[in-house]
Structure formats: structure tokens, C-alpha cells
Image (cartoon, rainbow, N blue to C red):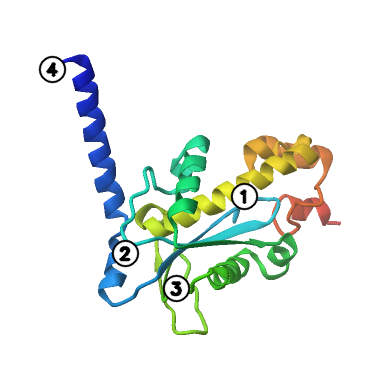
């Protein structure tokens, strides 16, 4: 076997393994399909634990068992790979939506309740309404008779939730790149608003910006010091 043939064989084996991996991600979707559900949406968020900016919640309905190369939890992909998979999801999905959960709402009702509301709104914003919704860990209730199921670590186990995690992550990362231009002292293009050591040091050195969440530490204590 020539070197070229050996490379082609390894590439084919790698592709087959990837096809099998992605195929397993449709276990929950296929289970719902066997129960008679036709349109199954996955929902996930990006930025829930961030100290700054809105949270992005996305919802995605994929065609049954559609193959999308490298479909996975967004956190397991590189920046360039997420962008590539994001494009393929947009091309192949039946419907996609995303919503911004604003800082003021997060500060007012707490991040847990804000996440629930964001997931609800993302589903309602879909151009085609699902009859089954898969969520990552959190249980969302709908007024209409939409069946829901929460899955722990759903972004690693469900194709639809993984797709939603990528849409949310890429959308929010593009926003943080814009914040970085306006507030370069905080390093948003690197920390994405999360509480890294350098980000927290920047908050103490420069104060909180207008896009920092007032209910999150250390911003909360900085703005409301104990007397």
C-alpha cells in the first residue's frame, strides 16, 4: 500500500468514525420520533456565567439524523471549527432562532429565571413551532402542549442541543469581539466576559463598565461596598 493509499484509508476510517459519533447524538431525537413527535428542537445558552453582557439563548430544529461534521458541544470545538459548523447548521437546519437576555433582566430576576425565560422565548421565536423540546439540564414549561425533556450534559449528548450551543456561542463570541473594541481594557475578546484573573483585575483597576452585570460578583461588591 502506497503512502497516498494509506492516508486515504486513514481519512476514510476517521470519517466513518465521525459519522458513527454524530449518529449517536440523535438518540434522544429518535426516541421522541418513535413516540410520534415530528419537529424536535434543541435549546441552549451562551454567557450564563459571564460577568458582562447579555446571555444568548438559541433554539434549533434539525432534519432527522442529518449529518453535520464535527457537531458537538460548542466548548469542545476550536473557534475556527465552531464557525465552520455554525455555517453548516444554518444551511441545513429546518429553523433557527436566538434571543438576547439583557443585563437588566438578568440583574432583576436572577440568572436562573432569566435563562428559563430566554429558552422559552427562543423556542417561540422559531419560524416553525416544535412539538418536542430538548434542553440542556433546565426544565422549561410551555403554555401550549409541547413536550419537553431536560438532559444533563445535553450539549454533549443531543445533536439538537449541540447545534443550539454552537449557534449561541458563535453569536455571543461575535458580540464580545465588538465589546473588545469599545472596552479594550477588559480583554473581552479573550475572556468572553467570564471571571478570569485578568478580567477581575481589570474590574478593580478600571471599575465596572456599562455592560457589566450588577448582580454578579465582584461587580456587585464593587458597586455596593459595605460601610
- In the picture as drawn, the residue positioned furthest to the left comes out as 1
User: Mark 4 sits on what residue?
Assistant: 1
Tag shown at residue 13: none
Query: What residue is at 33 percent from the left and 65 percent from the top?
Result: 29
**Distance (Cα) linking label 1 and label 4:** 47 Å
Disc 3 residue crowd, few under 14, some 14–19, many 20+, Cα 10 Å? many
Q: Measuring from the top left, give residue 65's x and y in whole percent.
A: 31, 58
Left or right: where 125 falls relative to 205:
left
Mark whose residue sits in front, 3 or 2: 3
When the figure is inspected, residue 151 is found, relative to residue 14, above or below; the finding is below
Q: Secondary structure at mark 1?
A: helix
Q: Measuring from the top left, give residue 103's x and y in whole percent.
A: 72, 60
- In the picture as drawn, the residue positioned furthest to the front comes out as 91
Query: What residue is at 27 percent from the left and 68 percent from the top?
Result: 31
- In the picture as drawn, the residue positioned furthest to the top comes out as 2
- Earlier along the polypeptide chain: callout 2 or callout 4? 4
In this view, the residue in front, 196 or 60, is 60
User: Mark 2 sits on what residue?
Assistant: 28
- Earlier along the polypeptide chain: callout 1 or callout 4? 4
Tag shown at residue 172: 1
When the figure is inspected, residue 108 is found, relative to residue 171, above or below; the finding is below
**Distance (Cα) linking label 2 and label 4:** 41 Å
The answer to which quarter of the image holds residue 111 is bottom right
User: Mark 3 sits on what residue?
Assistant: 130
Q: Secondary structure at mark 4?
A: loop
**Distance (Cα) linking label 3 and label 2:** 15 Å
Amino acid at each position: 500500500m502506497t503512502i497516498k493509499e494509506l492516508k486515504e484509508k486513514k481519512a476514510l476510517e476517521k470519517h466513518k468514525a465521525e459519522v458513527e459519533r454524530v449518529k449517536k447524538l440523535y438518540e434522544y431525537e429518535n426516541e421522541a420520533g418513535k413516540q410520534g413527535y415530528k419537529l424536535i428542537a434543541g435549546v441552549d445558552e451562551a454567557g450564563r456565567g459571564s460577568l458582562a453582557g447579555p446571555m444568548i439563548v438559541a433554539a434549533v430544529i434539525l432534519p432527522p439524523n442529518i449529518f453535520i461534521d464535527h457537531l458537538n458541544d460548542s466548548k469542545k470545538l476550536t473557534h475556527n471549527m465552531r464557525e465552520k459548523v455554525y455555517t453548516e447548521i444554518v444551511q441545513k437546519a429546518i429553523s433557527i432562532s436566538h434571543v438576547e437576555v439583557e443585563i437588566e433582566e438578568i440583574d432583576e430576576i436572577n440568572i436562573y429565571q432569566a435563562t428559563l425565560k430566554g429558552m422559552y422565548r427562543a423556542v417561540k421565536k422559531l419560524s416553525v413551532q416544535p412539538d418536542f423540546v430538548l434542553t440542556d439540564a433546565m426544565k422549561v414549561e410551555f403554555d401550549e402542549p409541547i413536550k419537553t425533556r431536560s438532559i444533563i450534559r445535553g450539549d454533549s449528548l443531543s445533536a439538537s442541543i449541540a447545534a443550539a450551543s454552537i449557534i449561541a456561542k458563535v453569536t455571543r463570541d461575535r458580540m464580545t469581539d465588538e465589546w473588545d473594541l469599545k472596552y479594550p481594557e477588559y480583554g473581552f475578546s479573550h475572556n468572553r466576559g467570564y471571571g478570569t484573573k485578568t478580567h477581575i483585575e481589570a474590574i478593580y483597576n478600571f471599575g465596572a463598565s456599562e455592560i457589566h452585570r450588577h448582580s454578579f460578583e465582584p461587580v456587585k461588591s464593587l458597586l455596593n461596598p459595605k460601610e
